[in-house]
Image (cartoon, grey):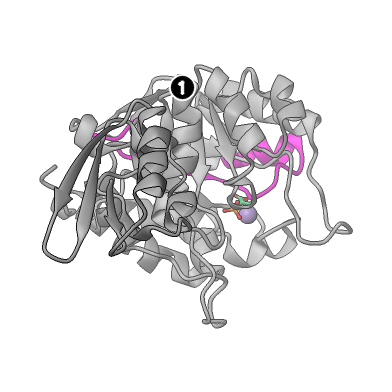
Amino acid sequence: MVVLLKKNIDEKQLNRLINWLEDFNIEIHMSQGMNTTIMGLIGDTSVVDIDLLKALDIVEDVKRIQEPYKNANRKFHPANTVVNIGGVKVGGGDFALIAGPCSVESLDQMKQIAKDVKSGGANMLRGGAFKPRTSPYAFQGMREQGIEVMMEARAVSGLPIVSEVMDPSQLKFFEDVDLIQVGARNMQNFELLKELGKLRKPVLLKRGLANTLQEWLMSAEYIMAGGNEQVILCERGIRTFETATRNTLDISAVPMLKSLTHLPIIVDPSHGVGIAKMVPPLALAATAAGADGLIIEVHNDPPHAMSDGAQSLTPEAFAELVTAIRNILPFAYKSNE
Ligand code: PEP
Ligand code: MN
């Protein structure tokens, strides 16, 4: 971190600042120019409140040289992280194809979709049991019963299961869930992230509706700081001024994250665009951009789905898409990290 000081500053205030920084075990290198004085801060500056520093009378500007996330940072961990989810690897060349309905609706539905997406090429099964809905009057999910249904669908298909947790109090139901999803609305639910950090289980961390890549990586850092390193990031579209699509899928996040972090990054084109027929082109674009996998909503009867039918593919459309994905995978962008 570099601190640019104002001209003609008060020595007493400067000494107070130096003492304050030294209390954090930070070493200070002063460099006096003709017009400006620069302080170079060496050590763990993640503990320093940058806004507090900027607000000081004697400080002109502050710049962070190193990103505030350590565990997720590619600089300190150059090799790609590979997350193993019930035997299915994601990252470092292994591609996740997660498919299933937005919501778990019944045991029969889930068993049938599990078989269909498996024969279509999926290697994991998704299904929301606890649903974050904009309206309190909309279907809220089958809740713990939905998790049990997912487990039965795993038993018939052999596919590891992915489901969303919304609150730490629900974690007791997730002991047998292979990949725990944190939804966009909970990306900054720090208490939930801390609880997930205590587990030794894979977590799928979706990007918040209006969060920067740095904020997202700081959320991954919350989980990793607790010792749980099995984090997969999921780009699912962000809020922009555009209203023609449900969200704006930020494909550029994929190659950018590849340079910033060693964590696997998958893409959710279903929530990204919100329109079923536009899911395949975006899924292919994400694959070509170097994503480590996709999560796609698939429903046996989209017009009657209890949530997100408009963006759900039929099992047939999913199988067709998987063939196209496999065709372009060998040509996908690979970062040189
Ligand atoms: C979902 O996966 O069904 C979901 C609610 O996603 P998101 O958190 O990305 O909106
Ligand atoms: Mn959904």
Name the quarter where the C terminus is drawn: top left
Query: Can residue 129 be seen in the rendering of this structure?
Result: yes
Query: Can residue 334 be seen in the rendering of this structure?
Result: no
Quadrant in the picture for residue 146: top right
Q: Give amino acid for label 1.
A: Asn
How many other residues sit within 10 Å of disc 1, few (<14), some (14-19) or many (≥20)? many
Image position, residue 315 (x, y; %): 52, 52
Residue at the spot 53% in from the left edge and 24% down from the top edge: 197
Foreground pick, 147 / 264: 264
Image position, residue 2 (x, y; %): 26, 50
Horizontally, residue 334 falls left or right of residue 59, namely left
Residue at the spot 49% in from the left edge and 50% down from the top edge: 52
Foreground pick, 5 / 201: 5
Residue at the spot 57% in from the left edge and 38% down from the top edge: 181
Instruction: Residue 157: say if magenta.
Output: no
Quadrant in the picture for residue 289: bottom left
Q: Secondary structure at mark 1?
A: loop
Magenta-tinted stretch: 90-113
Horizontally, residue 209 falls left or right of residue 121, namely right
Looking at the image, residue 284 lies above or below residue 92: below
Horizontally, residue 299 falls left or right of residue 159, namely right
Looking at the image, residue 60 lies above or below residue 131: below
Which residue is under mark 1?
A: 228
Looking at the image, residue 65 lies above or below residue 45: below
Quadrant in the picture for residue 113: top right
Q: For ligand 1, tell me if the residue under mark 1 lies within 8 Å.
A: no
Image position, residue 213 (x, y; %): 40, 54
Foreground pick, 114 / 235: 235
Count every numbered label the image shows and give the total: 1
Foreground pick, 175 / 294: 175
